[in-house]
Amino acid sequence: MRILGVDPGLGRLGWGVIDTQGLKNTATGFGCIETDAKLKEEQRIKQVFDGLIEIVQTYKPDVVSLEELFFSRNVTTAFMVGQARGVVLLVAAQHTLPVVAYNPGQVKLAVTGFGKAEKKQIGQMVKVILKLEKLPRLDDTTDALAIALTHAFTGKMGNKLGK
Amino acid sequence: MRILGVDPGLGRLGWGVIDTQGLKNTATGFGCIETDAKLKEEQRIKQVFDGLIEIVQTYKPDVVSLEELFFSRNVTTAFMVGQARGVVLLVAAQHTLPVVAYNPGQVKLAVTGFGKAEKKQIGQMVKVILKLEKLPRLDDTTDALAIALTHAFTGKMGNKLGK
């Protein structure tokens, strides 16, 4: 199974593609779509959309793994992240890809075995599990890989987004 | 000038197309894209996207008028509205339509002359200004017409979205 993990954001959208087979997980591609804050919001949204389309068409994932809405952020952040997340959902729907979502506690638990792990611990585990020489330059990319891994580890439990 | 006003939301996205010429404003089309809460979130997002594309291609507006992020709503609402708003921005960018945004106070002031007007007063003024026989069935549609009117009335001041 090929999983596309996404950590949505308008300024930085982290993404990571993982191939999972039995106990083996391989990072097939990862990166971060960065948009320029000087551009108009709608131009940035389009860059995110175009970038995602390219990723989906290049890697042809079987499923998209996302972080669930979480309540600790403020309204402005939630709004901006929501705008980018809407575009991720759209691209998934356009390619008839199922979407799964996990909350931060589930991601921490799946990747480190500890639901209250620090960001640094998650990074270390992502690096070890995926046998990366070094972590990606941006946390957003590491987070996306962690979200993809979460589905690789817990996906059999059938945590599906949507009501 | 033809203005598409949008009141974004995932469950209900209100839209209204207004033709403005001098002091005359005509409602050329309006309605509400409603999506079923029982569907998966990504399916609902795609319905919103497909609906917007149809509206833009049918009415060919010159500009899209939206409400600005506002801070009074809670995080969950901001997130859901943000997801739909991201799709509106995407459709605008894909059709190279400029996007303008107004805050609720600006909408109230433009439509009723009073920045703290009640929802009901806005509806009454929308009905009068646009010579509608009756108000649309849903508030979301009326709000979208009000947002379009706001740009018709204040657009010459060049209130553009984006930094």
Image: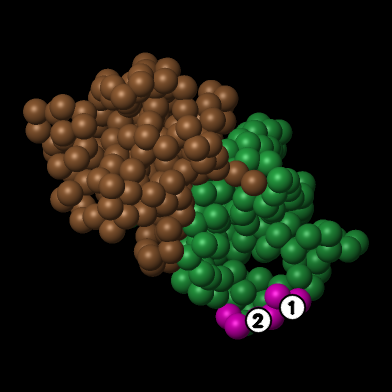
Chain colours: A brown, B green
Q: Nearer the viewer, residue B62 or B138?
A: B138
- Reading the image, the residue beneath label 1 is B121
In reply to whether residue A28 is colored magenta, the answer given is no
The residues tagged by marks 2 and 1 sit, at their Cα atoms, a distance apart of 6 Å
| Residue B115 appears in view | yes
**Residue A14: where, in percent of width, then height?**
30, 39
Q: Residue B117 — which label?
A: 2
Magenta span: B115-121
Q: Are marks 2 and 1 in contact (CB under 8 Å)?
A: yes
Residue at 50% over, 37% down = A157
Side of A130 where B120 appears, left or right: right
Question: Any magenta on residue B116?
Answer: yes
User: Do tags 2 and 1 sit on the same chain?
Assistant: yes
Helix, strand or loop at mark 1: helix
Looking at the image, is A137 positioned above or below residue B23?
above
Q: Quadrant of the N terminus of chain A?
A: top left
B135, A65: nearer the viewer? A65
- Mark 2: few/some/many CA within 10 Å (<14, 14-19, 20+): some
Image point (67%, 52%), residue name: B11
Residue B2 picture location, percent across and down: 64, 46
Give x and y (percent) for residue B26. Answer: 76, 54
In this rendering, does residue B90 appear at all?
no
In-image side of A26 versus A132 (left or right): right
**Residue A112, position in %: x, y?**
25, 46
